[in-house]
Image (tube, rainbow, N blue to C red):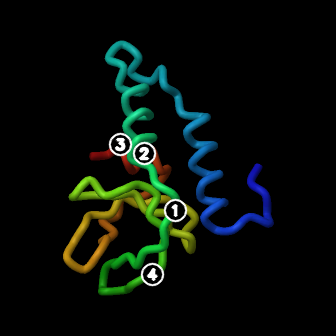
Amino acid sequence: MIQHDLSIPDRISDLIAMEMAEFDVSSASKTGVGAATLAAFERATCPPTRVEVQFSGGVMQTCWAVTRSNGDYRVIYLPLAGYFSLCVESCFGPLDIGVHGSAIGCFSSV
């Protein structure tokens, strides 16, 4: 359970730690995809960093980047929604593309 007195970045870090601990590395065990996905996600994670994200219609919202950009994408936590999003990099910053859910799920969708 996440403590109520944590800062937003600490809460996000706890969410990610719990998700990683509960991730089924045996998924697709014949190919090793589950373990490889978790390892790649772990390498890409960064401390939660405040970032402005653009949504449809030009709406901007302060969110938290949880992975480093790979040049095309990064995973963002949407605090008002309470879930993660895969965002595409643009000249205006991260742009929400409607891929939402768990951090690892968003990360592994590309």
Q: Which residue is label 4 attached to?
A: 61
Q: CA distance from mark 2 to mark 4?
A: 22 Å
**On the image, which quarter does residue 55 sit in?**
bottom left
Seen at 69% across and 68% down, the residue is 7
Q: Which residue is label 3 attached to?
A: 108
Q: Which residue is label 2 attached to?
A: 105
Q: Which of the two discs, 2 and 4, labels the residue nearer the N terminus?
A: 4
| Residue 35 in picture, x, y percent from top left | 43, 25
**On the image, which quarter does residue 69 sit in?**
bottom left
Residue kind at label 4, given as amino acid type: Gln
| Residue 107 in picture, x, y percent from top left | 37, 48
**Which type of secondary structure does the marked residue at label 1 adopt?**
strand
Discs 2, 1 touching: Cβ within 8 Å:
no
Looking at the picture, tell me which residue is in the foreground, 28 or 10: 10
Discs 3, 2 touching: Cβ within 8 Å:
yes
Number of residue marks: 4
Residue kind at label 2, given as amino acid type: Gly
Q: Which of the two discs, 1 and 3, labels the residue nearer the N terminus?
A: 1
> What crowding class fits label 3: few (fewer than 14 Cα within 10 Å), some (14-19), or many (20 or more)?
some
Q: CA distance from mark 4 to mark 1?
A: 15 Å
Closer to the camera: disc 1 or disc 3?
Answer: 1
Compared across the picture, whether 56 is left or right of 43 comes to left
Q: CA distance from mark 2 to mark 1?
A: 17 Å
Residue kind at label 1, given as amino acid type: Pro
Closer to the camera: disc 4 or disc 1?
Answer: 1
**Residue furthest out toward the top:** 30
Looking at the picture, tell me which residue is in the foreground, 22 or 56: 22
> What crowding class fits label 4: few (fewer than 14 Cα within 10 Å), some (14-19), or many (20 or more)?
some
Seen at 37% across and 37% down, the residue is 40
Q: Which residue is label 1 attached to?
A: 48
